[in-house]
Image (cartoon, coloured by chain):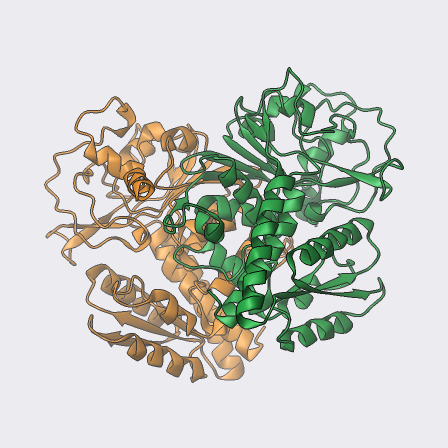
Chain colours: A orange, B green
Amino acid sequence: MALKNKVQSILIPWWRKNTLLSSTSRTLNTFATGSDNRIIKSPSLVSLDLPDEWTSSSTNCNAPSTNKLASEETGRVIDGKQIAEEIISGVACEVERMKKTIGEVPGVAVILVGERRDSQTYVRNKIKACEEAGIKFSLTEFSEKCSEDEVCDAIMGFNMDPSFHGILVQLPLPQRLNEEKVLDVMRLEKDVDGFHPMNMGNLAMRGREPLFIPCTPKGCVELLIRSGVEIMGKKAVVIGRSNIVGLPASLLLQVSDSFFLSFFHAISDATELRHHATVTVVDALTSNPEEITREADILVSAVGVPNLVRGSWLKPGAVVVDVGTYPVEDDSCEQGYRLIGDVCYEEASRVASWLTPVPGGVGPMTVAMLLYNTLESARRIYKFV
Amino acid sequence: MALKNKVQSILIPWWRKNTLLSSTSRTLNTFATGSDNRIIKSPSLVSLDLPDEWTSSSTNCNAPSTNKLASEETGRVIDGKQIAEEIISGVACEVERMKKTIGEVPGVAVILVGERRDSQTYVRNKIKACEEAGIKFSLTEFSEKCSEDEVCDAIMGFNMDPSFHGILVQLPLPQRLNEEKVLDVMRLEKDVDGFHPMNMGNLAMRGREPLFIPCTPKGCVELLIRSGVEIMGKKAVVIGRSNIVGLPASLLLQVSDSFFLSFFHAISDATELRHHATVTVVDALTSNPEEITREADILVSAVGVPNLVRGSWLKPGAVVVDVGTYPVEDDSCEQGYRLIGDVCYEEASRVASWLTPVPGGVGPMTVAMLLYNTLESARRIYKFV
């Protein structure tokens, strides 16, 4: 029991501790406070493995309102929106060619459980992108109170339906439902989110290929590649170790293949190329995170804690990929909230060489990669080359 | 094509480059030379993903002849042999209890292909340990020239045989054989080596449990735990990223549960304890490996390059786990060769707080963990608690 108590007291993540200290000598953690924005309590997509509540983090450090940088900024913006549009446009061409050649189109079935506003927005964006690319889309919605069996039955239905080549359960599920049980029902060949442990194992292991690479980390790496960022031999730090972003991002940076989007690239003969970054994963219990991030040539932050990463956490010239999307109430926005990232954008833009904004960075890439994975699944099933 | 050539020229690992440089300003890499020992060409167990030949590495840096340290040494030896014996003895008690209670004993089937001397030694050690613990053992040997189908047929036979609860294919297989195809035939429930991608995925992912944790990295972590080394919040560096050691070791250090050997421990109420180390994986293309290893509180080296890790690569007080086992011809040994590790033992023992010798460190633990995994498999199948 004594040990257990000790463990519990240790298990407070450092970013939580920061918010608990009223005065601290750790100057790096003096988050600006005093924001009027109320942080919406539901955790962001990438913060599933973290405590739900963040009481006093700042939400007003940055506001990347446009992609144009102010004069004092040095970092170039990685325009995820534009790159995603290029990819979606490429997918649309391939879908069109498939339709003309074999009379089939890719199809993806999305299952949404509950009423989370951020999940609803993500799903809406996916529907819109599928329509744009000519991909068939089906949305099955369940109430917050549905049973695990209902969700599993729906998945099994789509497993058998040959017109759907991808199935996606919008995460997070209500805590009541067993995510592992639900996801494991899915046919591996339709797991376009790449969250099946078999896909994750094949992603982790050398000499093996997963059927699908999870969309968000795949989007991150594609942003790096398309911005001409060299990954091989570089030091990369990933903050956060969630199953859906941090873990697969760390695996991808170690062994990611650029050939996964080869049909869009001119470098399609580089199918053997692997990006061997030296990756460190910083998690909630890392004792000196800012010392580690300051060593990073490439920093990927995916914890969903607003403005966690300050300018002083960065090595000059670092490339910063901000996966954090934290919803903050904002009546001036159409949805009633806006998203802010893990990285203090204003400060980071003065230190980094490249960085992704929130919104308009990684988010659109997640959607583009879902479309890409769905297309790839259909190509595989129809043996369409 | 130009890109491919460029990539190939970059893809020489730094430790290979070291041996190619006749004079160098990198003082850390001035391996002592002039050994009379001929390095046996077959790569060690953990160096499967590295080039096969190391022409000029030193083999005479260290000689941990006994577990007693000389006066100038500060590091305490982690006695893997003794810890392994304790574990095997614990397994033997459980096997005896199982036999008395339900009239069954655990069984493991080992498949050995080819004539590698080191593989033969490993298998011999496993047989001996199984006999000691009362575990049923079967060895199926194939010649170097056998077909994939023959090996797969043997595995499928054991898949169906209820008296075997574990199946192990001694790696590496001859290069001619497709390791992935062979390993994937194995029933997940009998994969006591934990090399199936489904087990690896479940090891990597939070909130999931693999059926089996690969024996060598599991042995490494158990050595740390039993030596009282705190892992949580510490910086760990893993050198090497092989599927069988480096990768699973890096995953385990991030999320390893101490409960996997809980029935031997007094701390069995700590089943929720996870060791959140901050892990960096150094691979063949890391540009400044020694700078990174000098930051490590815990260093695990698993590349199979003799004396790669010098004393100057270590942070004072670091804990060093040497997984490297490189066979060097030595007529004075019974088998005609002896094993040397990745770490220059003599130098490391003056800097490290704890370190494992080679032999007598991780090696015996691999065997003990195989027995433990086999017992666990039988317990699961028979629902024996």
**In the rendered view, would you say A233 is above or below B118?**
above
Residue at x 75% of width, y 40% of height:
B326
Residue at x 85% of width, y 64% of height:
B143
In the displayed image of the protein, which residue is found farthest to the top? B72
- Image quadrant where one finds the C terminus of chain A: bottom right
B304 relative to A119 in the view: left or right: right
Residue A25 point in image, percent of width and height:
25, 21
Residue B350 point in image, percent of width and height:
62, 20
Q: Is residue B257 visible?
A: no
Residue A80 point in image, percent of width and height:
37, 51
Give whichever of B139, A185 is nearer the camera.
B139
Circle count: 0
- Image quadrant where one finds the N terminus of chain A: top left
Give whichever of B132, B310 is nearer the camera.
B132
In the displayed image of the protein, which residue is found farthest to the front? B100
Q: Quadrant of residue B188?
A: bottom right
Q: Is residue B203 visible?
A: yes
